Amino acid sequence: MYKFPENKRYRILRPWLEEKFGGRTWKVGLDAGLSCPHIKDNVGCVFCDPPSYTPAARNEERLIYKQLIAGISGVKKAHRFADRFIAYFQSGTNTFGNINYLREVFSQSLNHPDVVCLSIGTRPDCISNKMLDMISEVAGDKHVIIEYGLQSINEERAKWMNRGHDLECFNKAVLKTAAYGFDVVTHVMVGFQDESKKDMIELAKFCGDLPINGIKIHNLHVTINTPLAEWYFNGEYKLISQEEYIGLVCDIIEHLPKEMAIHRVSASSPRPYLVAPEWCRSSPANSQLIDNELLRRDTWQGKHKNNNIFEESRLNKC
Ligand code: SF4
């Protein structure tokens, strides 16, 4: 078996960051007050809970530098020697805003000497060369990670969940971003009805064939005030079981390149927002079940995937 750090059967994020930045690295979540261009009349993706993007649910401190200082001191209370951080713009679509405003907030976050990386979450249809040029300019020699939501490679499912962009758009965004030398992380979702092992293998191969360095695997879960919640309560939509979810995630892991960092293997929402399933509340429990299943199958990340070396020429096509 290929040896992954910490005796795991897949590449978890913490040692990946340690290797990249030369020591333990913490994320500090920052809120630039940005919305999402896809939310119209309070509806965006069918699983997305718009109230969690309203100011009331967000950081009231508007100055990014102050948010950063507060976040860093919070980490240092628990980890006195913490000395490297990622400025993580997580809430909303963080390239959806005036470019001068974004230049200012990204610069503020990078001014702190202990910040080693700028990480930006956004949508693939909300990126441009002009934006990437600006990010490259403000980041200088600091590291950049851009996160794109993908959720599914099945165009019908993407329409069903109202993603508002297609696969080609995602492809272009990833290739364009990687050509800047930035790391690319993607979010995928597991748990749509009628998904099979074959779907998971195709998803893993699709991600593995692109210059994507990291993946976040989320279980589809129901949050309040969403179209999905309505369908769930009406009995029109059924969630998959925890056992099914664990099996499908392991199918993905087996087919991902072993170099790719797996940032998360399940997801949930805070208590007032989550409707179902109950089992997604505990990430450690789900991680443990995935470890158990990989062990039971005697399998690991990349067992069924040949090494995936990206050719320079592919990165320059977009
Ligand atoms: S793109 Fe993100 S923020 Fe926007 S509606 Fe979809 S899940 Fe919500």
Image: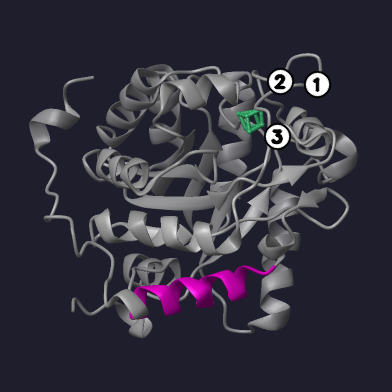
* Residue at mark 3: C-beta within 8 A of ligand 1: yes
Q: Tell which of 151 and 140 is nearer to you.
A: 151
* 188 relative to 96, above or below: below
What is the secondary structure assignment of the residue under circle 1?
A: loop
Q: Is residue 298 rendered to the left or right of residue 44? A: left
- Dot 1 amino acid type: Asn
What residue sits right under mark 2 in the picture? 39
- Dot 3 amino acid type: Cys
Which tag, 3 or 2, sits closer to the chain's start?
A: 2
Q: Tell which of 67 and 112 is nearer to you.
A: 67
Residue furthest to the front in view is: 235
Q: Quadrant of residue 13?
A: bottom left
Q: Residues within 10 Å of mark 2 (few under 14, many from 20)?
A: some
* 128 relative to 12, above or below: above
Marking on residue 197: none
| Contact check, label 1 and label 2, Cβ < 8 Å | yes
Residue 150 drawn at (x, y percent): 46, 34
| Contact check, label 3 and label 2, Cβ < 8 Å | yes
- Residue lying at 64% horizontally and 84% vertically, measured from the top left: 80
Marking on residue 48: 3
Q: Tell which of 259 and 107 is nearer to you.
A: 259
Q: Which residues are magenta?
A: 282-295
Q: Residues within 10 Å of mark 1 (few under 14, many from 20)?
A: few
Q: Quadrant of residue 97?
A: top right
Residue 213 drawn at (x, y percent): 32, 50
Marking on residue 42: 1
Residue 195 painted magenta: no
Residue 293 painted magenta: yes
**Does residue 115 appear in the picture of this structure?**
no
Label 1 – label 3 distance at C-alpha: 10 Å
